[in-house]
């Protein structure tokens, strides 16, 4: 992917800024990471799955006043957004600047099904939806590389040092391998079912990423070895997926959970759901995303078992669960 350099203008609309179309929409979805999170920040590969049923929708409208974001019926000027929404404000301003659109008299309403701070890419999905709404309002093209660079600008505010996997996976339609800032589709040799369940514990991705860095730097040989092992598991998982070796793949997911625990991103609520999934017949289970809470992902080899595993995790305290069927292809 070609690097695209964008700068976020702190200034208010430039005199020649155009006016946005009166109404435009954009959307994106959630993602899960099958394996490779955290190691991806250190240049290792990761596998991501789009979670299409969980969506973010954004709608841009002309409303007199300063550039504002509306959610849950409340409209807030981007300059007054609370810290946890700062990245979506950056997405809106960066996209308007990119298309040379006026900031004033624009309101963007955002609706998301994606639980925030749960490892499902809510911030990248929101950034994508907003950027697409602005692009549609500008009625202008946006290359994949430009779109990625805009989302990454917002993600740097949300995460600090995002690998880019969320930016790519929250618009992808098929499972993908992420490596070196670019994605390639994964070949799926046999259908598989994934169950994503939410512990209900909210955690900051930025803090989890910083925590892993502290663990790695405190003992560089050990930290590097843990990350290398995660990288190896991910490469082996790609081959398992290609050949439809689901039980081997399941074992690698559970092994990855131990490595993530050793990197300091585990949580007792994750352990409870992983244990419940394995006891109910999942072939493997681990946290997905940043960890320290958030969601877990379990894998099964048939649809009925996936429902059983979801029910078992609900009984073990999951606050929500989703079954994803991934077809061969
Ligand atoms: O933002 P989350 O929680 O979905 O996780 C992102 C994945 C990490 O590997 C932890 C961070 C990154 O930027 O790759």
Image (cartoon, grey):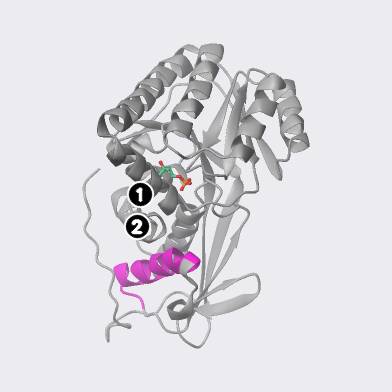
Asked whether mark 2 and ligand 1 are closer than 8 Å, the reply comes as no
Element under label 1?
loop
User: Residue tagged by mark 2?
Assistant: 156
Provide the residue span drawn in magenta.
84-101
87 drawn magenta = yes
Which residue: 48% across, 40% down?
Answer: 265
Q: Is residue 281 left or right of residue 247?
A: right
Which residue: 45% across, 85% down?
Answer: 66
Q: Residues within 10 Å of mark 2 (few under 14, many from 20)?
A: some
Estimate the x, y position of residue 163 in percent, counting from the top left.
Answer: 34, 44
Whether tag 2 and tag 1 are in contact, CB under 8 A, the answer is yes
Estimate the x, y position of residue 155 in percent, counting from the top left.
Answer: 38, 56
Whether 222 is drawn above or below 150: the answer is above
The disc label shown at residue 162, or none: 1
User: How far is mark 2 from mark 1, CA to CA?
Assistant: 6 Å
Front-lying residue, 288 or 48: 288
Q: Main secondary structure of the magenta part?
A: helix
Whether 220 is drawn above or below 146: the answer is above
Which residue: 51% across, 23% down?
Answer: 253
Whether 235 is drawn above or below 314: the answer is above
Asked whether mark 1 and ligand 1 are closer than 8 Å, the reply comes as yes
The disc label shown at residue 134, or none: none
> Which quadrant would residue 127 be assigned to in this image?
bottom left
Front-lying residue, 133 or 128: 128
Q: Quadrant of the N terminus?
A: top left
Estimate the x, y position of residue 161 in percent, counting from the top left.
Answer: 32, 51
Label located before the other in sequence (2 or 1): 2
């Amino acid at each position: 992917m070609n690097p695209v350099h964008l700068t976020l203008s702190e200034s208010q609309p430039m005199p020649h800024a155009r006016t946005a179309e009166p109404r435009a929409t954009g959307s994106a979805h959630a993602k899960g990471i099958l394996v490779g999170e955290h190691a991806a920040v250190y240049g290792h590969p990761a596998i991501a799955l789009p979670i299409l049923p969980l969506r973010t929708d954004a709608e841009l409208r002309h409303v007199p006043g300063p550039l504002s974001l509306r959610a849950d019926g409340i409209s807030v000027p981007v300059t007054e957004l609370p810290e946890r929404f700062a990245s979506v404000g950056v997405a809106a301003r960066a996209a308007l600047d990119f298309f040379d659109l006026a900031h004033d008299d624009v309101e963007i309403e955002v609706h998301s099904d994606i639980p925030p701070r749960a490892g499902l890419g809510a911030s990248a999905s929101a950034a994508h939806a907003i950027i697409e709404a602005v692009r549609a309002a500008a009625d202008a093209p946006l290359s994949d590389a430009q779109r990625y660079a805009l989302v990454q600008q917002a993600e740097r505010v949300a995460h600090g040092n995002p690998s880019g996997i969320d930016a790519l996976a929250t618009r992808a339609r098929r499972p993908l391998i992420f490596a070196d800032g670019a994605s390639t589709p994964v070949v799926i040799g046999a259908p598989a079912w994934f169950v994503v369940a939410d512990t209900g514990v909210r955690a900051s991705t930025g803090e989890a990423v910083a925590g892993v860095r502290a663990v790695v730097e405190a003992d560089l040989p050990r930290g590097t070895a843990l990350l290398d092992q995660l990288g190896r598991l991910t490469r082996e998982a790609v081959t398992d997926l290609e050949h439809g070796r689901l039980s081997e793949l399941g074992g690698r997911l559970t092994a990855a959970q131990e490595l993530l625990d050793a990197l300091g991103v585990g949580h007792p609520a994750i352990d409870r759901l992983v244990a419940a999934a394995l006891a109910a017949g999942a072939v493997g289970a681990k946290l997905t995303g940043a960890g320290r809470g958030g969601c877990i992902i379990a894998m099964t080899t048939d649809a009925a078992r996936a429902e059983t595993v979801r029910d078992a995790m609900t009984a073990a305290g999951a606050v929500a669960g989703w079954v994803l069927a991934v077809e061969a292809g």
